[in-house]
Amino acid sequence: MSEKTILISGAFDTIHLGQLLLLKHAASYGKVIIALNSDEWIINKKGFTIFDFETRKILLEEIPYVYKVIKVADDDGTVCNAMLEIRPDFFGNGGSATSSSIPKVEIEVCDYLGIEPVFSLGDTKNVTEDQYLITSQDKIIRYSIEQLEKLEKTLSII
């Protein structure tokens, strides 16, 4: 029997502790596959991106809880295409997401494919300090600083 998988979707334009906790919790369900939203989706939602798709993908791949990061066709505002492609065992959501706050069609696709929706991932009520989280956040910060320094050098040459 193959290991179970859980699909998590999001922009992850800046990665914070809450998202790391979500990913850690998601890993308890199986291999974590992230359907990473496009730059266009983020721009449509908030008007700008902090990191481009490839940078966000690289950062996420550094997190020990993440099995794989995929590009998602999200022009319809959902991750239904990713669910159809991956066919995970679980579809995970964190924060305040509920079955009534995510697009209804995502729940319908879960029902159709037999995917179990999971909510409240990353609940911080009983969280203890975890070295993996600290290490992951440190790698993300170091990588971000390196990228900013490269950009500054490039801009100073121009």
Image (cartoon, grey):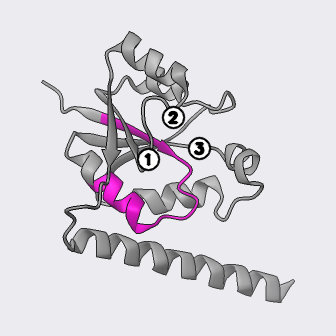
Viewer-side label of 3, 1: 1
Q: Quadrant of the N terminus?
A: top left
Could you tell me if the residues under marks 3 and 1 are in contact, i.e. CB atoms within 8 Å? no
Q: Which mark is residue 96?
A: 1
Distance from label 3 to label 1 (Cα)?
19 Å
Magenta region: 6-24
When the figure is inspected, residue 106 is found, relative to residue 158, above or below; the finding is above
- Is 158 left, or right, of 150 in this rendering? right
Q: Mark 3 = which residue?
A: 37
**Few, some or many residues within 10 Å of mark 2 (<14, 14–19, 20+):** few
Q: Mark 2 = which residue?
A: 101
x 18%, y 33%: residue: 3
Identify the amino acid type marked 1.
Ser
Identify the amino acid type marked 2.
Ser
Distance from label 1 to label 2 (Cα)?
8 Å
Among the two numbered marks 1 and 2 on one chain, the one whose residue lies closer to the N terminus: 1
The residue lying furthest to the right in this view is 158
Among the two numbered marks 3 and 1 on one chain, the one whose residue lies closer to the N terminus: 3
Identify the amino acid type marked 3.
Asn
- Is 148 left, or right, of 109 in this rendering? right
